[in-house]
């Protein structure tokens, strides 16, 4: 019985860290990939390594936007079979900001790995979206400085709101930046861990508002600094 309980515990641990998609991805109308504008025929679900479910509904438009043009020399086209499921989930949650940006980008990486993208390539793509991809924080009202405060921002309802930035891949010479990372990962996919890639991205943008802050920012005296 003791051995059985140990085995059961091991199996439960394995399930908890097993990320996977459910079902096949069907896009319509036929041939839409050539125009870069498709619609999901059925819902797409992904369970991440923490057991959290991510879902894109049927009827959702998608253009494979997680794979921008400068990615293509490194990884291929936006609607390639290995990438598109991860891109659909990632883009859906980047547009809606319902979960933190760091977790959302990490799910993109997990989805790529689940679809058989080699470790080095998946890490390269993760680094790019972590560095230049969309970012957002939840602004939470704190102490108010009064109705006449000249720095007062729009939190008049007293409820949180989202402050976000769209993807800004043009901030750096991303092609040159990715070539250096690609060379390291091509030689040894384990040369850079996820944590090291995140640290590299933060070092590139040391004063960045979204890197400096967590998922929520308390706004005191109506002040918002970015």
Image (cartoon, rainbow, N blue to C red):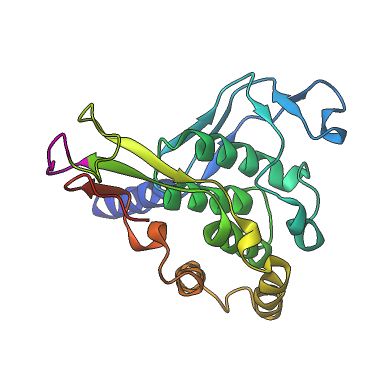
Closest to the observer, 148 or 23: 148
Left or right of 101? Residue 141 is left
Q: Quadrant of residue 70?
A: bottom right
Residue 46 appears in the figure: no
Left or right of 154? Residue 143 is left
Residue 179 percent across, percent down from the top left: 72, 74
Task: Please name the residue shown 13% across and 41% down the image.
Answer: 144
Task: Please name the residue shown 50% across and 37% down the image.
Answer: 93
Number of labels in the image equals 0
Q: From what the image shows, is residue 213 above or below residue 51?
A: below
Residue 54 percent across, percent down from the top left: 48, 35
| Residue 127 lies in the magenta stretch | no
Q: From what the image shows, is residue 43 above or below residue 150?
A: above
Q: From what the image shows, is residue 199 above or below residue 137?
A: below
Magenta stretch: helix, strand or loop mostly: loop
Residue 110 appears in the figure: yes
Closest to the observer, 111 or 196: 196
Task: Please name the residue shown 28% across and 47% down the image.
Answer: 216
Residues shaded magenta: 141-148
């Amino acid at each position: 019985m003791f051995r059985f309980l140990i085995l059961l515990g091991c199996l439960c641990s394995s399930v908890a860290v097993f990320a996977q998609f459910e079902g096949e991805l069907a896009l319509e109308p036929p041939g839409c990939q050539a125009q870069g504008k498709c619609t999901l025929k059925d819902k797409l679900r992904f369970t991440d390594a923490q057991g959290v479910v991510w879902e894109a509904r049927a009827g959702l438009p998608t253009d494979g936007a997680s794979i921008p043009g400068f990615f293509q020399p490194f990884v291929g086209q936006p609607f390639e079979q290995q990438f598109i499921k991860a891109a659909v989930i990632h883009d859906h949650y980047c547009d809606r900001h319902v979960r933190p940006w760091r977790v959302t980008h990490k799910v993109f990486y997990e989805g790529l790995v689940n679809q058989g993208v080699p470790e080095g390539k998946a890490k390269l793509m993760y680094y790019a979206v972590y560095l230049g991809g969309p970012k957002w924080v939840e602004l939470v009202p704190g102490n108010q400085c009064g109705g006449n405060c000249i720095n007062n921002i729009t939190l008049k309802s007293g409820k949180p709101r989202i402050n976000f930035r769209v993807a800004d891949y043009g901030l750096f010479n991303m092609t040159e930046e990715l070539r250096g990372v690609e060379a390291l990962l091509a030689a040894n996919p384990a040369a850079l861990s996820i944590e090291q890639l995140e640290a590299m991205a933060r070092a590139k943008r040391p004063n960045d508002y979204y890197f400096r802050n967590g998922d929520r920012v308390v706004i005191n005296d109506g002040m918002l600094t970015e």
